[in-house]
Image: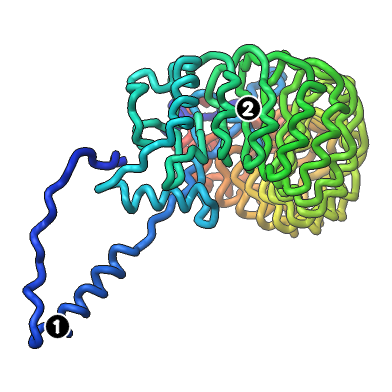
Amino acid sequence: MMIMPTTAPKSCSPATGTRAAPPNPLPSLSASNAAPRLLLLAALALSAAADCSFSTVSRPAPLPRSPHAARPAKQHLLSPFAWPGRAQRSLLRLDAATPAATAARSGAATGAARPVIMDESQLSALVQLNEAWGTWAGNSNAATACAAWAGVTCSPKGLVLALDAKAFVADPPPSGAIPADITNLAYLQYLDLSYIDLVGSIPSLASLTSLTHLAIGMDGCRLAGTLDGLGWLSSLSNLQTLRLVGLADFTGDLSSLHILSHLESIQHLALSSLTNATGEIPREIRYLTALTALDLSYLRAVDFPDWVTQLPNLQSLNVNADDERRQGLLSDDFSLLTALTSLSLGHNNLDGYLPKSWSSLVNLQELDLTYNRLQGTIPATFSTLTALTKLVLSENSLSGSIPPAFSTNIQILWLGYNSFSGPIPPHLALTNLVELQLSSNLFTGGIPSAFTKLTAMSTLDICNNSLSSDLDVVAQMTWLTDI
């Protein structure tokens, strides 16, 4: 029985030209009004100095679709580093302390009367990029104001500090090769090319030593090359974020990426969907102890990288795989990563039991262990994981009854395709549940009457069990359709 809704819940540019000076709102200075006027001038100065800031707006990854009675195809679930598809967006964050943010605020503060004029060498490089990608097709190559170039952030001196391709979201996306002229943007700190359908090879960017953020690749990316040709990455010692995603036509041995261990400042690293690369994920990555987010998903390494538990500051870890050869053991050592908020270990053929010691992961919000070979029961100690909002344990060999071990904050709970037995317990009527998947287990009896209070629920999947045919409870759940 699959129950789900019929429909899914659904710059100012700087002024140009010359402006006439506004009339003076202050009276002429005299002995009688000098003090009040000075006070008013001070107030105006404080008002003009008021700062502005950029905020981050991120759309969350869409919730996973509930499977039907037939065994579902493998899905990429709960990826903390899910690379944005063409319809998803994540706006550029310019933190208040970064030079790029300072430059942006400077431009905003002075742009109304005096727009930032781009340095001639920087303009020339952007013209070459425009000819390669057509990303600024409606823009005149003679436009010298930084604000005329979408996705570009300049310093007050007209030096390009950030180039963010997320400003070019289009269908189809811009396409073309990465021209060598991009290295003429020598002051770049932020370079995100993830929304361009790139072709050809990746030129050496070793000279862009100011880079703190580098993102290359997207779903269906047509870039090609060899992994050992990326040795220049070790020169970018200031990198804090590196994302190489969807480079499916790159070949070579994954171990050649050991050069990344030189990037001691890196905090966010994504090496995902390099599906034609072989070998083992370099163990040297474990030396990058500043890492807070690590995405090693959909790599064709045979051995599970159990050394990831040596990265003490991880908050987000995605090692989802899609290779039947992958194998390993589910380790107690993950309990050491107490800062984790998201852990995705799906499709790894991991053997073992759900460790009781994981009760230490009190900050965990998302846990995906789908498509493994886990046995035993759900530990009662999981009741300490009160921050959990998503728990995916489907496609394992878990058994027994379901203990009262789940946080009331859980919104997505997938327990399907296991061997759980007994009646569906009333304590599964968790107030905030949106999706509940219990299909293909050994449940008996009926549906608890407490489920009639789950007004936030949109999907209920209880097919392929030994439940009674009494649907009175379901009939009262009028907010559910497609019964």
Out of 278 and 100, give the one closest to the viewer.
Answer: 100
The image position of residue 241, as x and y in percent, is: 66, 41
N-term mark: 2 or 1: 1
- Name the residue at 54% across, 36% down: 474
Quadrant position of the N terminus in the picture: top right
Q: Which amino acid type is shown beneath numbered disc 1? A: Ala
- Name the residue at 79% across, 15% down: 251
Front disc: 2 or 1: 1
Disc number for residue 198: none
Out of 275 and 241, give the one closest to the viewer.
Answer: 241
The image position of residue 171, as x and y in percent, is: 44, 17
Is the residue under label 1 in contact with that under label 2 (CB below 8 Å)? no
Query: Gap in Å between the C-alphas at discs 2 and 1?
Result: 60 Å
Which quarter of the picture shows residue 34? bottom left
Q: Residue at the far bottom: name it.
A: 32
345 sits left or right of 15 in the view: right
Q: Tell me the element at label 2.
A: strand
Can you say whether 319 is above or below 102 in the image?
A: above
Can you say whether 351 is above or below 110 in the image?
A: above
Give the tally of numbered discs: 2
Query: Mark 1 sits on what residue?
Result: 34
